[in-house]
Image (cartoon, rainbow, N blue to C red):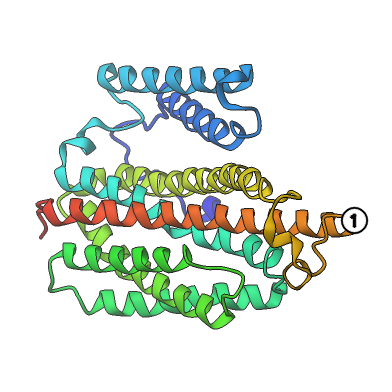
Amino acid sequence: MVVLFIRQTSKDEELKLDWTGFLALSLAIVCVQLMVDRSERFDWFDSGEIILYACGAVLGLYVLVVHTMTSDRPFLNPQLFKDRNFVIGIVLVFVYGMLNFTPITLLPPMLQNLKGYPDSLIGLLLAMRGVGMVIGFYIAGRMGKFDPRVGLTSGMLLVGVSGVIMATFDFNVSPGTVGWVGIVQGIGTGVMWVPLTIVAFASLPERLMPDASALFHLLRNFGSSLFIAVSFMVVLRTAQINHFELSQNVNPYNEALRFPSVVGHWDIGSLHGLAKLGSEVDRQAQMIGYNNAFIMYAAVCFVAIPVLLFVRIRHH
């Protein structure tokens, strides 16, 4: 398709890729992503590998900023950042990216490993979010006469509420609850998307649209991948902390463990019972870790809402 349909549209000037800016931006993004992905495993800055990633990110960002300010035709067009709407839009789309794919990444391992849901049921529950997005897009199409902040705030509020509900999930949560929370979340993300794109591109001149669109979607994807990595880091870190705290209660001096009706198969006097109890402690600690990740997810939404209310958006 590219060979058949893509043609050179401008004969007045030769289009060249700014390799310095492109490589500097790529280096910064790759190093930040690797640092967030691998730091928990290698104990952060106690690892030479993580320090190397941090240095690479700083170097790439420094070269990118300096080159963008001094080059005649940089990879990132500085004129984009003179448009107030677009700057607001890329900040919001970064937050949108953080919120968009994180739940469908966290929920499958939680439902499968801790609840024992089959893959077919998990897929069906995730599809409910898609149903919600269809509804959200339909609602957004009927809100064209409203200020974009109405749609953005409404959508962010719905996503935040879904995050609060997910933070209360426990081992007794039903598939129906997971499904309707996904619908609410899908409606919120769908309602947000249309006004978000309107805000970002409303006042940009046509000649800047290609550069603006590339940066817009780059930040959306980067926000998503970054926040997913941070969320799993929160799950792992807080699960380890809570496993340590919960396991302190497993000792011969715990009065509750002296009653057979309470202990059941969790008999600390036998290896089999102790293994059963250790498995349950690990399961409870992991659920707390997921709850903490969803609390962080909801917090991002509610921190963003006041910003939306006080921002003055120019739109056509």
Q: Residue at x 60, y 34 (%)?
A: 40
Q: Quadrant of residue 11?
A: top left
Give the residue drawn at x 37%, y 74%.
Answer: 187
**Label 1: how many Cα within 10 Å (few below 14, some 14–19, many 20+):** few
**Residue that mark 1 sits on:** 270
In the picture, residue 245 is in which quadrant?
top right
**Which residue is at 26% across, 20% downward?**
69
Q: Quadrant of the N terminus?
A: bottom right
Q: Residue at x 35, y 68 (%)?
A: 161
- In the rendered image, residue 103, in percent from the top left (x then y), is placed at 51, 61
Q: Measured from the top left, where is residue 87 in percent x and y?
A: 22, 42
Query: How many numbered marks does the figure carry?
Result: 1
The residue positioned farthest toward the right in the image shown: 271
Q: Position of residue 86 (x, y in %)?
A: 22, 46
Regarding mark 1 in the picture, which secondary structure is present there?
loop
Residue 85 position (above or below residue 56): below
The C terminus sits in image quarter: bottom left
Left or right: 307 as drawn, with respect to 254: left
Q: Foreground: 305 or 152?
A: 305
Q: Is residue 127 above or below residue 308?
A: below
Q: Amino acid at mark 1?
A: Ser
147, 5: nearer the viewer: 147
Asked if residue 170 is positioned above or below residue 300 in the image, the reply reads below
